[in-house]
Image: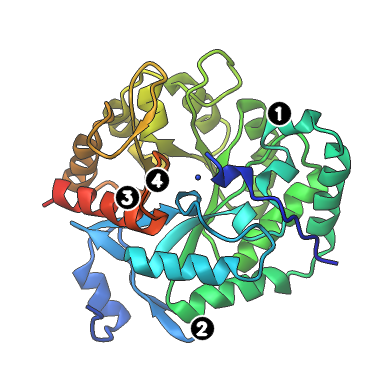
Amino acid sequence: MVLRFVARDRDRATQDRHPMYSRRQLGKLAFAALPVARVFGQATFRPTAIAGIPFGVETFSYHDLPSAGDARLIPTLIEDMKASGIAECEIMSGHVEPMGSYATGWWVATRRAPGYAKMRDEARRWRLAVPLDYYRAVRKQFDNAGLRMHLYNVNFNETFTDEERDRTFEAAKVLGVEGFSSSTVLSEAKRLVPFVKRHKMYVAMHNHNNLADPDQFATPASFEAALAMSEYLKATLDIGHYVAGNNDPVAFIEKHHGRIVNIHIRDRKRNNGRNMPFGQGDTPIKDVLRLIRDQRYPIRCYIEYEYGSFRSSTEEVKRCVDYCREALA
């Protein structure tokens, strides 16, 4: 039975059409890092690119989606992506599964809440029992819309059993994603090594800015420790969080561009400062985008809108995309 959690996912609370080209023709039009169009289901996927850079969105950016488990969630997300002019995404597990990430251990504070153990066990049992056709149906909706889930955002943590980790990798394969992005910790990265090797699917570590906990991904050294564990462990560099932790994203990208799958574009103030509209914080968004463009680094750039506004999430995501477009003009 599909579990349905009616509470909103806490992850969202802080939340020219062209003629058809052949594969060979599209390969000539795009630079080396840009994937050619591929046909999934009924529609043709055409990457969103600005100055040759593949752009996408972390679905966390859409704060006004229906709750996890609501049948309207995926159709609404698809319409929001279309309205934003973005063809690919990093999709959150709470936007695929019928329970939010708070039910699977990511929000540490919720682990102390009454009834959490039961909720976590129910989420685990759902993952282990649900037919893989469930994930196939999610993929079909994106395929039919000509959109693509490129990454699956699953926040692996110590509450996962090995069986649950294996099943999550199998689900990701059915979704058709290339790999995972994960807000996780170094100790969990170590536990993931045998799984990424067995499934030959990468997990890209997503950083935050908790400098007090050495297990967190928040510094160059923490990233480098994980990258040394396996070729299948990579990086999702959130440049806003990185700057909030008083680090230099340009220097990190120059050094580790071969291991960075994607960046999350957000603007924040230094010294653990707040999220800001693009161009109003301390994050060198323009310098980062121009570096990736000029050096032709194979790094995808994903919008992550979080700063808050009276406008809709879709409108704000479009404004973020426009800012990037102007930066690369």
Quadrant assignment for the N terminus: bottom right
Judged from this view, the residue extending furthest toward the front is 310
- Residue at 37 percent of width and 56 percent of height: 56
Which of the 4 quarters of the picture holds residue 308?
top left
1 and 4 marks in contact (CB < 8 Å): no
At mark 3, the secondary structure is: loop
Three-letter amino acid code of the residue under disc 2: Gly
Between discs 3 and 4, the one toward the N terminus: 3
Count neighbours of disc 3 (C-alpha within 10 A) and say few if under 14, some if 14 to 19, many if 20 or more.
Answer: many
The residue depicted at 74 percent of the width and 44 percent of the height is 103
Per the rendering, the mark at residue 305 is: 4
Instruction: Name the residue tied to disc 2.
Output: 41
Residue 86 can be seen in this image: no
Residue where numbered disc 1 is placed: 109
Locate residue 309, reporting x and y percent. Answer: 37, 44
- The residue singled out by tag 3 in the image is 298
- Does 295 sit above or below residue 150? above
At label 4, the amino acid type is Tyr
Considering the numbered disc 4 on the image, is that residue within a helix, a strand or a loop? loop
Above or below residue 318? Residue 263 is above
Foreground label between 1 and 3: 1
